[in-house]
Image (tube, rainbow, N blue to C red):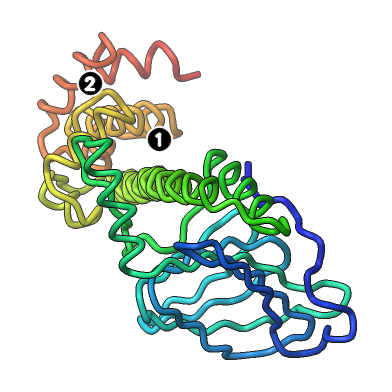
Amino acid sequence: MSNRIDLLAIQTPENLRKGQEHQTRFHCGAFEVLIFETFKSSTKIKICYEGLSVSSMIRGYKTVFTKEGEVFKFKPGTSLILADKETIFADFPEADIKNPVQCATILISKDSLNQQLQFLNTNYPSDEQWSIDFSNFHFNNNSGLVRTFNELLQVVIQQQPNHALTDLLLKSLLIRIIESQKEHQIQKNSVEINNKFLEIKRFISENISLTLNTEELTKVGNCSKSTLHRMFENYCGKTPGAYILQQRMNSARHLLLQANCNISEVAYKVGFSSLSYFVKQFKMYHNCTPGDYIKKFKH
């Protein structure tokens, strides 16, 4: 489920709703909040700030291009952080008067950010330092981040600013950002591991007749032996070797029931160079020999 920032009323006066990107700025003591609104498609808009910027898309989307060559859609339900003077570019391919792009950005100077993080680390020490992960700069919002972001926006757009409250909300926002980044990284790692595991399983299935070993599987999955074993234990409750044997036996069982099957050929097709060893393993696994299995189930 996507955790989205609540929609805001359009801030830009109607007579200014043209192609360029308009901004409404709110000064909040140690930080600023900017509401950006775009009403016409545009390309390669440069985005760069001094200090930390935290942006969350409210409506519409923009396509972001990083200097490393990464391209992604910045959509509602996600946030984007940039380090001091980090530069990206953005396209607004579908923005128009009826479908404006609206984004909220919080700007925090380097000194203010360091003070806030120092406060958290001094007063609320934990096993891990309170810090922003700039390598994990585009991440999914969690519900806590959305609640804090929404409350902060509602406070700052009031005519009478409450600096005490906004300072507390800023601390809360930084905590929520750090939590969201960690959750997003865990989800990302889980997806990557799952994809690796599926690729390894596919390789085993397609090469069941070959000699398979852990060294070869680690190359396929681009992982260490310990990670390989951990994946199989977590997803299958088996070692890689036990899983491979299971797949060999399942394939053998299927092949033995085919017309004109030959037990020696079946043994070879499922990766056994020795017929006697195949018969031994088959009997241990199915509690009968391949010949007995054919007699019992083949009609």
Which of the 4 image quarters holds residue 231?
top left
Q: Is residue 292 above or below residue 229?
A: above
Image quadrant occupied by the N terminus: top right
Residue hosting label 1: 260
Amino acid type at mark 2: Phe
Label 1 Cα neighbours within 10 Å, binned few <14 / some 14-19 / many ≥20: few
Q: In this view, does 175 lie to the left or right of 155?
A: left
Residue 202 shows in this picture? no
- At 25% from the left and 51% from the top, the residue drawn is 118
Give residue 288's position: percent from left, percent from top: 26, 11
Give residue 49's position: percent from left, percent from top: 45, 79
Q: What element carries label 2?
A: helix
Q: Which mark is residue 282?
A: 2
Amino acid type at mark 1: Asn
Q: Nearer the viewer, residue 65 or 102?
A: 102
Q: Nearer the viewer, residue 141 or 253?
A: 141
Q: Which of 225 and 131 is in front in this view?
A: 131
- At 29% from the left and 29% from the top, the residue drawn is 234
- At 76% from the left and 55% from the top, the residue drawn is 7
